[in-house]
Amino acid sequence: MTQSGKSPEGQVADAVKDNWVDRLAPAASRPYLRLSRADRPIGTWLLYIPCIWGVLLAALHDGNLQLWDFWLITASGAGAWLMRGAGCTWNDITDRHFDAQVARTRSRPIPSGQVTVRGAVLWMAAQALIAFGILLTFGPTTVMIGVASLGFVAIYPFAKRFTWWPQVFLGLAFNWGALLGWVAHTGKLEWPAVALYLSGIAWTLFYDTIYAHQDTEDDALIGVKSTARLFGDNSPRWLWLFLGLAVGLMGLAVWAANTSHQLALWAALMGPLSFGLHMIWQLRRLDINHSGTLIILFRSNRETGLLPVLFFAIAAML
């Protein structure tokens, strides 16, 4: 909020209040930063965290945590920020007509007229090219893995038009970093990374179903599909299922990554345990009819994902 109590000009309805874009960014850059969701950082965290999981679990697997891994983790953060921005820009280009009909999204830069479609395309390309430059430092195998994710990124905005499960496509795209981080460290793809990736997809189904309940009425009016609409009042039962899958698959990934060093194994298993406990905390506070609670719970998934990061890091250093 400004000192006068009014929202900054062009602020997006669901942006974090008093965010750095509205307060500090040059006025000319704000519409583009809003297009990239820089004023709503939770999406960057949700894309970035699986990358860290992948790097740390791979280091636990071969017992070789090294300085290179700190570069991988740092560079993955920059890449996640850029690719989340490019992906959100693509999403807003494809959804501009839908967004104009939904109360929560009509203030976004394209439907509100802050950015033209041509400007958005150029901004998307710039972000993707810089991210690709970072990816080139990870090695040729990782580059191929990274490029392969673009198919899911391209399809996701259209998924809600043809399936009740668009959150699956979001999960496929958002958790690719678990594979990327593993391959960047080890140079090859192994099945513990796949189990970790599947765990992330189940987690995405959990948090994005919560998120999607904010828009069920508008989505029904314009014909947009989601797991929130599909499950309706049965959502809590499905969320318990996704919780169980996410925790179980992460536990399997940890067990497969390290079965020889018992202390490190038990430390790492605290990751999926704390992960699950935080999701249980969310479910106990869930109210699918209260938008304020839904957005708070959705944003709390940064902490959900960082808990395994903490325990994986401890285990990799033992």
Image (spheres, helix red, strand yellow):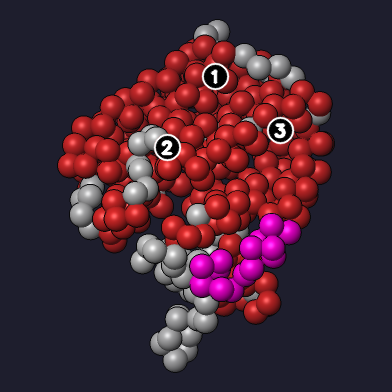
* Mark found first going from the N terminus, 1 or 3: 3
* Magenta segment: 109-122
**Residue 259 appears at what percent x and percent y?**
52, 9
Q: In the rendered image, which residue does mark 3 sit on? A: 147
Q: Are marks 1 and 3 in contact (CB under 8 Å)?
A: no
> What residue is rendered at 76% in x and 38% in y?
135
Closer to us: mark 2 or mark 1?
2
> For the point 59% across and 74% down, which residue is it?
114
> x, y percentage for residue 106?
44, 67
Q: Amino acid at mark 3?
A: Val
Question: Where is 53 relative to 95, above or below?
Answer: above
Query: Label 1's element?
Result: helix
Q: Which residue is mark 2?
A: 162
Residue in the foreground of this view, choosing between 225 and 5: 225
Name the residue beneath numbered marker 1.
194
| Quadrant location, the C terminus | top right
Amino acid tagged 2: Phe
* Residue type indicated by callout 1: Val
Q: Is residue 1 visible?
A: yes
Residue 273 location, quadrant: top left
Coordinates of residue 248 in the picture (x, y in percent): 38, 20
Residue projecting furthest to the left: 233
Packing grade of label 3 (10 A; few <14, some 14-19, many >=20) is few
Closer to the camera in the image, 98 or 109: 98
Describe the element under mark 2 as helix, strand or loop. helix
Q: CA distance from mark 3 to mark 2?
A: 24 Å
**Can residue 111 be found in the magenta stretch?**
yes
- At label 2, counting other C-alpha atoms closer than 10 Å, the crowd grade (few under 14, some 14-19, many 20 or more) is few
Splitting the image into 4 quarters, where does residue 228 fall? top left
Q: Earlier in the sequence, mark 3 or mark 2?
A: 3
Residue 156 magenta-highlighted: no
